[in-house]
Image: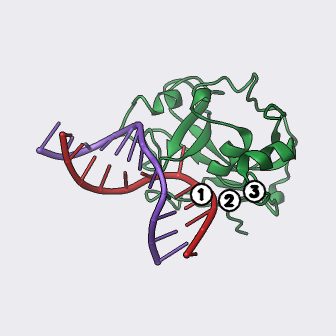
Chain colours: A green, B red, C purple
Amino acid sequence: MGDARTGGVIVETEAYLGPEDPASHAATQKGRTTRNAAMFGPPGRAYVYRIYGMHWCLNVVTGPSGQAQAVLLRGIEPLEGIDEMISRRGRAGDIASGPGRLCQALGVDGRLYGHDLRRPPLQILPGWRVPDPGVYVSGRVGVRAAADWPFRFCVRGSSGVSRPGA
DNA sequence: ACTCCGATTGTT
DNA sequence: ACAATCGGAGTA
């Protein structure tokens, strides 16, 4: 089966701002390009891009049109269609912890560029509140510029977090 | 046209 | 510690 519904709870995210954020694909020097165009579009859409020539990364555009703000989804804790996700990943461990793994597990690729995340085949649904003590903040992973900006949010103790910290 | 390198992952 | 792998972005 390659059509089983898959999904989980988002447990690790990273925020990226617009021109004022040197680590953002929308940084001033770069401006609007073909690749980051979705970032400048309306919120609630998917900004998908390829990294290192082999992995996909999924962002949720968050700022209003023109502001180019987005949130990178770095990890989910698998809930539905686990077998399908394991099949897509080709391994049982680390199913969807990490931006690349998350996309592979959910079957996300460039076809979803600009997709409206309120509707199938990929949607974000209401979850539940996590009390502040259950969340910790850290610097961003894998970036050179502004790596220390406290924009990474993780659910404490979750197995879906890619690089567990405090 | 050419070079550099990345919001990563898996293996050595 | 390092290879895999390639298109985007900058330079010319």
> What type is the residue that disc 1 sits on?
Pro
Label 2: chain letter:
A
| SS type, badge 1 | loop
User: CB atoms at circles 1 and 2 under 8 Å apart?
Assistant: yes
What is the number of callouts on the image?
Answer: 3
> What type is the residue that disc 2 sits on?
Val
Point 72% across, 55% down: residue: A97
Q: Quadrant of residue A28?
A: top left
Q: Are marks 3 and 1 on the same chain?
A: yes
Percent across and percent down for residue A54 are 53, 47
Percent across and percent down for residue B5 are 37, 56
The residues bearing labels 3 and 2 have C-alpha atoms spaced at a distance of 29 Å
Label 3: chain letter:
A
Looking at the image, is mark 3 or mark 1 nearer the viewer? 3
Q: Earlier in the sequence, mark 3 or mark 1?
A: 3
Q: Which residue is mark 1?
A: A150
Q: Which residue is mark 3?
A: A91
| Residue A138 marker | none
The residues bearing labels 1 and 2 have C-alpha atoms spaced at a distance of 6 Å
| Residue A137 marker | 2
**Horizontally, is A115 left or right of A90 in the view?**
left
Q: Is A73 situated above or below A95?
A: above
